[in-house]
Every structure is written in structure tokens, then in C-alpha cells.
Amino acid sequence: MPNDTPDDAASYRERVDRAADAIRQEGGTAPATGIILGTGLGALTDELDAEAVLAYDDLPGFPASTVESHEGQLLFGELEGVPVAAMQGRFHLYEGYSPKEVAFPVRVLATLGVETLLISNAAGGMDPHHERGDLVLITDHINLQGANPLTGPNEDDWGPRFLDMSEPYDPELRDLAKEKALDASIPLHEGVYLAVVGPMLETKAEYRYMRQIGGDVVGMSTVPEVLAARHMGVRCMAISVVTDECLPDALDPIDVEAALAAAGEAEPKLTRIVKGVVREIGAPVAS
Ligand code: HPA
């Protein structure tokens, strides 16, 4: 696994705190809701009434961007009238980042006060019922990345050394997502997300194995971010967009154009569900 950004001698914790301080100074508010605008949620950028847009590259402490992740920024503003912080662009292990660096923006958001994190991603569908363009609400995960962001010294005031993982994806948020999907007549599967490093897709033998051990969808993101979020007590909800069908006995070579088209097709559906959830969790609690 690659090391953390080598040119920065400050501890990881110091870098997270420094980035959070800089954001506060730039006027980034402290919203309770964070969103990772992964595959299928790009259009939310247009709907977000942004008060502050902060490029990762301009924020002290943030991991240095690689060619692949050149476009990264944090958006602070309102969505559906609810204050949110959104990550446009995320870091991936396959780009060479360590799990800690991948989780860095989530650590910063949690430090700023984010309590709920809504996440989207692209994934391969291994359940034969999944079709390209379908949405899958993640109920649980299997980490096959061989690493995670919680190793090394534990920051006790961030979270526990031995993190409970009995329910990483918040049941209440999952119910809300299902309710919003049902209201809008949007089919929403449920399934287990299996995380790999990538960047290659899987072999037939690997898909067969991943299916047999309990995976429904497979992707290259989300798990490091969820682990860091859960470590800091942040509630998580994640939805996958199925961009390719991964049936070992009927596997076609990856069709990147079709995968992108599937993501585009899923966007209005996913956007609608996430907006519904944001509205609901942003609503004042009736007393
Ligand atoms: N495997 C891993 N990651 C992915 C896939 C896949 O088939 N599709 C989209 N992300």
C-alpha cells in the first residue's frame, strides 16, 4: 500500500484539523449533512445552492491530487433548503492513495460537524436480477481491499480502537431511501457491496468467488469512507448504480460507454431519492 502524502510531515490528525480550520475561515458552514457526489449524483451540483466552493488543491493538508482526481472540490450550500456539504470528486485506492488519504475529506467533514453521510458509487452487478442502470441500496459490505483507514494509532476522541460494524449502513436512512424510492415509483434493489482496489475489472473466476461469498455488487470506493465516517459516529447511507452486469457464465468485456450511459440513465432516479432523504433529515423534528 502506498504511504500517506510523503511531503507533509504533519500528522494525519493535524492535517485534518488544519483543513477543517481553513474551511471554517473560508466561510464553509458546519452542516449536519454531507454528500459524496459519486457516480449518478453529478447533477446535484447544479441544484445545490453553493455559498462556498473550495478546491481540494487549495485546502491545506488535503492529499495532493493525481492526474485522475484533478477535479475535486467541496461545496457548501443548500439542497432542498437544507444546509449540506458535498464532495465533488473523491480519492480512490487505484489512483495510488492510501486508505487514510481516501478517507481524508470524510474525516474533515466529520470534524466540521457532519453527522450524516449520503454516498453514491458505480458498481458491477453480480446478482442476476440486477440490470445496467439499476440502483442498489447498500445494506452491508465486504472489504476485499486488503487495507482500511483505521489502522495505525487510534485517535481516541475521533472514535474507538475496535469499531463495531454490526450495522454500518443506518437502518433508519435505509428505510427513508426505500420510502422515497417507493413514493417516486423508482425500483431500488438492496444488496451487499463488495469493495476491491481496482483499477482492473474482475475475472470470471473472481466474480464467481465474490458472488459465492455474499457480494451483490462490486466496486472500487465507498468502504474506506464509510469506515472513517462510522469511526467518528457519522450515520451512512450508500446507493450503487449498476454500470455493468457481472455474471461469470455470461460475461461480456467491459463496455465503458455503456457503463457511462447507465450512470447517466440512473442519475434522475438517484438524485430524486437523495433529495427526498435530504429533505426529510433536514426537516425540524416535531416536538
Ligand atoms: N468491478 C469493480 N468495480 C466496478 C465494476 C466492476 O465490475 N463496475 C463498476 N465498478
Image (spheres, rainbow, N blue to C red):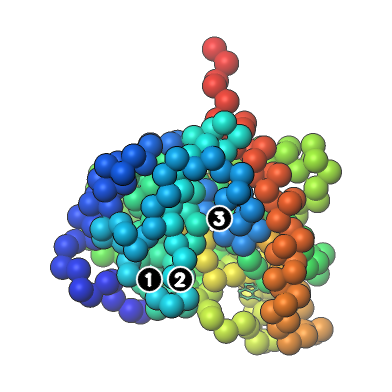
> Where, quadrant-wise, is the N terminus in this rendering?
bottom left
- Left-right relation of 231 to 255: left
Q: Earlier in the sequence, mark 3 or mark 1?
A: 3
**Which residue is disc 2 drawn over?**
69
Q: Give the residue drawn at x 28%, y 52%.
A: 19
Q: Is residue 57 above or below residue 93?
A: above
Numbered disc total? 3
- Left-right relation of 233 to 250: left
Where residue 30 appears, x then y in whole percent? Answer: 38, 36
**Which residue is disc 1 drawn over?**
65
Amino acid bearing label 3:
Leu
Give the CA separation, mark 3 to mark 2: 13 Å
Quadrant assignment for ligand 1? bottom right
> Which element is circle 2 on?
loop
Q: Give the residue drawn at x 57%, y 25%.
A: 283
Where residue 29 appears, x then y in whole percent? Answer: 38, 37
Q: Residues within 10 Å of mark 3 (few under 14, many from 20)?
A: many
> Where, quadrant-wise, is the C terminus in this rendering?
top right
Q: Earlier in the sequence, mark 3 or mark 2?
A: 3
Foreground pick, 161 / 109 = 109
Give the CA separation, mark 3 to mark 1: 17 Å
Which mark, by number, is residue 37?
3
Amino acid bearing label 1:
Ser
> Which element is circle 1 on?
loop
- The answer to whether one can see residue 267 in this image is yes
